[in-house]
Image (cartoon, rainbow, N blue to C red):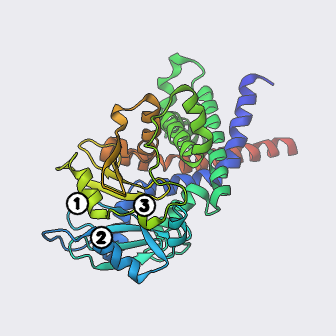
């Protein structure tokens, strides 16, 4: 059997084996490219309020929430830059906070939404809870996309599927373009040459046209699902900038670690970026400092990439991080989500990722149809 026939065999059976995973990943990925807009439309009562003058105190909001849920503490606040957007509070269990860690999964509810102008609590939910209610639909789709709703085991499965998908795409490129001079013909679809030829041409053109982007999306998915596996390999070639050392001594009481409140920490960080929107502020429990993220002009993701670290003891600036000034490793790490989601290239990038997510289902449908047709023809010949 020739090398080409062997490659075709591997490509075909990889595609058939991965078919269900690829359809699921593609469709959910297309939806998640616009998850902010979808959630705001599904549950406007959680994400939108009437825009007003002034802002409520973060300390007051945190106190109100923690008095309602005494077993929980606020882990971090997330902000959206547009007027009328609510504040999202991500919760932590009090026990985990005392131990110097974040345990979002054990917090019920894990997300609480507040009016940024009045501090009123708008609603709450447990992120990732399996259910089809309006409030839980998009988080469930996110978990389905990332881990098949199977937790860490699911993250490994999706990473392995993504790796096999990269191999399948590479073989597809080799099969579609055996010679460079035939590249242009590989993108032509002969619609009038019959269904079989049209499906073959469409499968080849769609796969070849999107292969590089699909490979990038697959690799970034592997990186984000298994950072503990991928990052050591990256760091061996491209070192990362170390984050500030912790200032919370082992065994230190939590009340001593957080003498400074949310508002004071945010005020310290704002001195560096007085006119830029704040994307979020969180407590790094293990280290004893706040992390404040800013959304700068031309930023590559909605959560912001510029970070300032503020002491929870005295509001002093502990350090800062901006990937644009960092090492090559910092840039590789920071660009993973912006590439995967398309956010790194604004609205055009998100639209491109959304459309590209529909290519795997198209490849599965056309490829499966061609395989079934070939199988039927072979059986007819053998029965004669």
- Between marks 1 and 2, how big is the CA–CA gap? 22 Å
* Front of the two marks 1 and 2: 2
- Residue at 36 percent of width and 67 percent of height: 88
Mark 1 touches mark 2? (CB < 8 Å): no
Above or below, 157 relative to 201: below
For the C terminus, give its image quadrant. Answer: top right
Mark 1 touches mark 3? (CB < 8 Å): no
Residue 257: assigned label: 3
Left or right, 181 with respect to 279, comes to right
Mark 2 touches mark 3? (CB < 8 Å): no
Residue tagged 1: 82
Above or below, 226 relative to 207: below
Residue tagged 2: 59
Q: Earlier in the sequence, mark 2 or mark 3?
A: 2
- Between marks 2 and 3, how big is the CA–CA gap? 16 Å
* Front of the two marks 1 and 3: 3
């Amino acid at each position: 059997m020739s090398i080409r026939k062997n490659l075709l065999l591997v490509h075909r059976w990889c595609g058939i084996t991965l078919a269900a995973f690829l359809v699921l990943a593609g469709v959910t990925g297309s939806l998640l490219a616009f998850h902010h807009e979808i959630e705001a439309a599904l549950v406007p009562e959680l994400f939108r309020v009437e825009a007003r003058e002034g802002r409520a105190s973060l300390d007051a909001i945190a106190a109100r929430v923690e008095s309602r849920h005494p077993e929980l503490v606020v882990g971090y606040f997330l902000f959206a830059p547009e007027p009328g957007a609510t504040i999202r509070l991500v919760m932590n269990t009090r026990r985990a906070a005392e131990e110097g860690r974040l345990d979002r999964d054990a917090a019920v509810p894990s997300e609480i939404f507040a009016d940024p102008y009045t501090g009123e609590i708008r609603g709450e939910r447990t992120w990732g809870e399996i259910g089809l209610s309006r409030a839980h639909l998009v988080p469930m789709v996110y978990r389905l996309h990332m881990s098949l709703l199977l937790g860490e085991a699911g993250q490994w499965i999706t990473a392995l599927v993504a790796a096999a998908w990269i191999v399948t795409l590479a073989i597809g490129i080799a099969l579609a373009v055996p010679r460079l001079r035939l590249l242009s013909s590989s993108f032509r679809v002969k619609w009038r040459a019959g269904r079989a030829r049209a499906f073959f041409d469409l499968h080849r053109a769609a796969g070849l046209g999107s292969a590089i982007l699909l490979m990038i999306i697959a690799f970034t998915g592997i990186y984000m699902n298994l950072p503990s596996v991928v990052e050591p390999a990256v760091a061996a070639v491209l070192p990362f900038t170390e984050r500030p050392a912790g200032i919370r001594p082992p065994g230190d009481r939590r009340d001593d670690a957080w003498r400074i409140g949310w508002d004071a920490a945010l005020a310290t960080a704002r001195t560096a970026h007085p006119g830029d929107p704040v994307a979020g502020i969180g407590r790094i429990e293990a280290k004893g400092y706040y992390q404040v993220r800013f959304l700068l002009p031309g930023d590559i993701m909605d959560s912001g990439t510029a970070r300032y670290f503020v002491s929870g003891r005295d509001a002093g600036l502990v350090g800062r991080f901006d990937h644009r000034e960092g090492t090559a490793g910092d840039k590789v790490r920071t660009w993973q989500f912006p590439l995967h989601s398309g956010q790194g290239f604004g609205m055009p990038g998100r639209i491109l990722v959304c459309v590209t997510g529909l290519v795997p289902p198209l490849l599965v449908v056309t490829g499966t149809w061609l395989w079934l047709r070939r199988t039927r023809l072979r059986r007819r010949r053998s029965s004669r």
